[in-house]
Image (cartoon, helix red, strand yellow):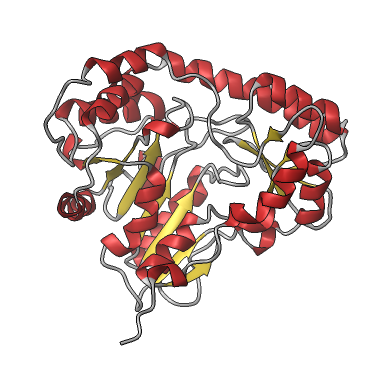
Amino acid sequence: MLRRSVASRLPDFPWDSLNEAKRRAAAHPGGIVDLSVGTPVDPVAINIQAALSSVADVPGYPVTHGTPELRAAAVAAMARRFGVTGISPNAVLPVIGTKELIASITRDLGFGSADLVVFPELAYPTYEISALLAGSKMQRSDTIVGGATPSLVFLNSPSNPTGRVIGVEELRDLVAVARSAGAIVVSDECYLGLGWDAQPVSVLDERVCGGDFTGLIAVHSLSKTSNLASYRTGFITGDHNLVAELLEVRRHAGLMMPYPIQAAMIEALTDDSHENAQREIYRSRRAVLQAGLRGAEFHIEHSEAGLYIWATRGESCWDTVNWFADRGILVAPGEFYGPQGAKFVRCALTATDERITAAVTRIV
């Protein structure tokens, strides 16, 4: 019997196509400035490190649902940081990095070849991967009107890659249309705490959903503002029944967040001071990089929130990637995120102050 591997369903890994540009950028006498990936470079707060090590001698298995203390900390943080109230601690589920959750959620909710998954025109590639792994149909669209009825809709505000923020009214309309179609909404809110020129809101905000979380899942990460990408810390919350369904699947699969990571996550969710400090670091880097790009005659679109600047010179994104590479800078081509990105590049704020300054010096 012929077997078709799951891997054969998937596209090439996008960042592999940057290898040549990376090689050219690395040859620059001043070294590479890597703005292509949003990976944190700043230190993990000492109190979070201490929380991690304080339980390093716990030998038993953790539980998939996470400790009651972790779930309570997530509920409190959602209320304190984003104004979202009414979450039940039982409707919080820690995940081993939100990319893993997003990639598997279409399949884990039972969707397959008969189902349509909708995600934004310009989108984080893992939404597409989620549909492909489930064998589902997919559609790029910033609306949910017309065409086939979706089963699952991914939203992302602030957007990766564009930094666009979906306002309260638009978000409310999207939720209403999805609900009328009977679709589940998965809202990727990993950059919710990084609003600059606009204030992002959660899909669980009362102004958006009326306090009713039915059919809604919000996805949150501590990788960005707490610099915990290597810890793989995130959680989902929202519809109690959907969270319970995903919990059951993950229990059977043995997807358990390590207990020391849960302890670190509690500290990160409880302490706002480190998050506020990191946000100001990104604000400063953003101002420097924006000014440099505009000085080099780039047009910046959206970019009102999040960790990226979405910029264009009106040419092929690969021509722009090569222009940057010749100056020792690596950026991500916009076509990674969809056809509408063909003339844009994404520049991450996740480089040190010194590297951001070096990039600006090279392009202005």
Query: 12 or 72: which is nearer to us?
Result: 12
Q: Position of residue 81 (x, y in %)?
A: 40, 25
Q: Position of residue 272 (x, y in %)?
A: 40, 17
Above or below: residue 278 compared with residue 5: above
Q: Is residue 90 left or right of residue 43?
A: left
Q: Position of residue 264 (x, y in %)?
A: 30, 23
Above or below: residue 86 compared with residue 131: above
Q: Quadrant of residue 308?
A: top right
Q: Residue at x 56, y 38 (%)?
A: 38
Q: In this view of the protein, can residue 234 be seen by the observer?
A: yes
**Placement of the N terminus among the 4 image quadrants:** bottom left
Q: Residue at x 35, y 77 (%)?
A: 113
Q: Residue at x 35, y 40 (%)?
A: 206
Q: Position of residue 76 (x, y in %)?
A: 28, 25
**Placement of the C terminus among the 4 image quadrants:** top right
Figure label count: 0
Q: Residue at x 53, y 66 (%)?
A: 11
Query: 300 or 363: which is nearer to us?
Result: 363
Q: Residue furthest bottom?
A: 1
Q: Residue furthest left?
A: 60
Q: In this view of the protein, can residue 177 be seen by the observer?
A: no
Above or below: residue 74 compared with residue 190: above
Q: Quadrant of residue 229?
A: top left
Query: 134 or 58: which is nearer to us?
Result: 58
